[in-house]
């Protein structure tokens, strides 16, 4: 058997596996959809993760920050680009269907930006921002961590991702962001 065949079989098996804990959590979150203000809030938070939040933080630091903050914005931009590359590659390899495609009684409340679910690109990018900017500008940690957690939670609530998509996205994003920050600190600060 070739390595490619084994890899495809592993990813195909994982892609369709949903743990009972994940299913239960998603059902509980779906019950909360009866509250329109909560659904509107999570839609807003999810859309912030499309880029406006990171752009606003970056522009603010570029305009009002000193040299270390401006360098941190460059590190965050590198983290964001690396995050997009990483999640795009992983999604093409793993090809996990989105929850609303697998469960007939689950709808997706926002159109997803791409076809596959694993890992959550919004969450990976949000935690990469937390990891890089938070490491280089510690005063931003409360804002960045809160935003990243809410963005991840919104993706499950809205039916775009399974909890493990978000969990793995958060872990990979944090690792990626902190690695970029460490390298940036070593090279430029």
Image (spheres, rainbow, N blue to C red):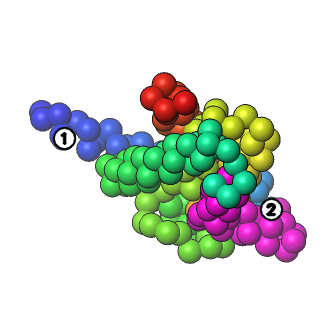
Determine if the magenta segment contains residue 52: yes
Instruction: Work out whether residue 139 or residue 93 is closer to the camera in this orientation and state it.
Output: 139
List the residue tagged with mark 1: 5
At mark 1, the secondary structure is: helix
Q: Is residue 171 visible?
A: no
Q: Residue furthest left?
A: 1
Residue at 75% x, 42% y is: 140
Q: Position of residue 97 (x, y in %)?
A: 45, 59
Labels 2 & 1 near each other (Cβ < 8 A): no
Q: Residue furthest front?
A: 67
Residue at 64% x, 33% y is: 135
Q: Position of residue 153 (x, y in %)?
A: 70, 52
Determine if the magenta segment contains residue 155: no
Q: Position of residue 117 (x, y in %)?
A: 48, 56
Disc nearer the start of the sequence (2/1): 1
Is residue 31 shown left or right of residue 13?
Answer: right
Span shown in magenta: 32-61
List the residue tagged with mark 2: 31
Q: Position of residue 175 (x, y in %)?
A: 53, 32
Quarter of the picture containing the N terminus is top left
Q: Residues within 10 Å of mark 2 (few under 14, many from 20)?
A: few
Residue at 26% x, 38% y is: 7
Is residue 51 shown left or right of residue 42?
Answer: left
Instruction: Work out whether residue 33 or residue 104 is closer to the camera in this orientation and state it.
Output: 33
Q: Is residue 67 visible?
A: yes
């Amino acid at each position: 058997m070739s390595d490619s065949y084994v890899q495809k079989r592993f990813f195909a098996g994982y892609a369709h596996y949903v743990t009972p804990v994940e299913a239960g959590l998603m059902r509980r979150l779906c019950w909360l959809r009866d509250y329109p203000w909560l659904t509107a809030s999570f839609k807003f938070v999810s859309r912030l993760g499309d880029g406006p939040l990171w752009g606003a933080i970056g522009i603010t630091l570029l305009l009002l920050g000193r040299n270390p903050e401006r360098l941190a914005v460059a590190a965050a931009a590198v983290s964001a680009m690396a995050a997009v590359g990483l999640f795009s590659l992983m999604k093409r390899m793993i090809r996990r269907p989105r929850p609303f495609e697998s469960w007939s009684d689950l709808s997706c409340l926002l159109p997803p930006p791409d076809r596959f679910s694993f890992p959550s690109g919004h969450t990976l990018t949000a935690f990469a921002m937390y990891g890089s900017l938070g490491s280089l500008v510690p005063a931003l940690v409360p804002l960045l961590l809160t935003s990243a957690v809410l963005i991840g939670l919104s993706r499950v609530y809205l039916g775009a991702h399974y909890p493990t998509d978000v969990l793995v996205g958060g872990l990979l994003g944090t690792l990626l962001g902190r690695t970029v920050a460490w390298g940036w600190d070593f090279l430029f600060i």
